Image (cartoon, grey):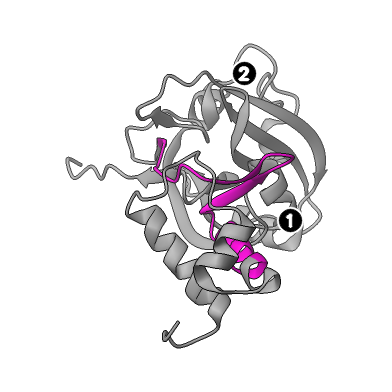
Amino acid sequence: MAEPGPVYQWIADDLMRRIDEGLLKPESPIPSRSRLKEAYRASDQTVDRAVRVLKAAGYVEGQFGRGVFVVDRSARATLDRGTGAVDSPFATRVVGDTAEVDWEASTVTTTAPPAIAERLGITTGDPVVMTRYEYLANRRPVQLATSWEPLAITDGTDVAHPERGPYARRGVRGRLAAIGVRVVRAREILESRPATGWEAQALGCAHGQCVTAVQRTYFDADDRAVETSDTVIRADRWRVAYSIDFSS
């Protein structure tokens, strides 16, 4: 125990190293509290604090009545955000898995808060269609997304509701093309940040665990913003891939 810093952090770092090196396998239990106390000559409180660090970092998760298990941290799928991607917030290619992919959505008409109004180039309080998505792989949540569309563009048309009608589930470009709106470009901003409480609960990760947040806005031929969305994915389970087309 000659390492600098708090003992609990040294224990957590050592366990992370063992997990990274494959000495503790994914989905296997970590040593019990009594074994960790003996191995590191530490107190209950110190060991418990080290395990909390592992949980917050996404290395382990508690299973009620069973113990604490190593998380499979290998990226299981790729979110393809390139120009050739499927036009959907859930444009994915599942890697090494045969996951059954689906999503659930709920749509309401509401008013644009200041940040969303700025992204859409409209006035705060203007009516928008907001849709919340929960994306599932084998019925387990893996992504969250929220989209906003100015109601002034789609009101009274067959595409006013993104998930209903003859153009449901066709993506932003496909739906808006049906009413003569040609989407020509999209702009994205990526950031890594801690998961909020409700995001952690929905995605099955620890509160504060790192997620990748993708802000995407679509523009038409007149450079008018026609839709903006926020997508949140677990950074330890997903890659984000981009294809950049230089042909034009």
Work out whether residue 152 can be spotted: yes
In the rendered structure, the answer to whether residue 69 lies left or right of residue 164 reads: left
Q: Are marks 2 and 1 in contact (CB under 8 Å)?
A: no
User: Secondary structure under badge 1?
Assistant: helix
Residue pointed to by mark 1: 197
Disc 2, SS: loop
Residue that numbered label 2 is attached to: 168
Q: Quadrant of residue 78?
A: top left
Q: Earlier in the sequence, mark 2 or mark 1?
A: 2
Residue displayed at 46% across by 61% down: 15
**Observer-nearest residue: 5 or 110?**
5
The answer to whether residue 209 shows anywhere in this view is no
Task: Confirm whether the magenta stretch covers residue 169.
Answer: no
Q: What stretch is highlighted in magenta?
A: 48-77
Q: Is residue 9 above or below residue 111?
A: below
The image shows residue 45 at horizontal and vertical percentages of: 70, 72
Q: Residue at x 67, y 22 (%)?
A: 163
Q: Where is residue 133 in the image (x, y as percent from the top left)?
A: 66, 34
| Camera-side residue of 138 and 52 | 52
User: Alpha-carbon neighbours of circle 2 within 10 Å: few (<14), some, or many (≥20)?
Assistant: some
Image location (x, y in percent) of residue 131:
71, 36
Of badges 2 and 1, the one in the foreground is: 1
Residue located at (45% from left, 53% from top): 188
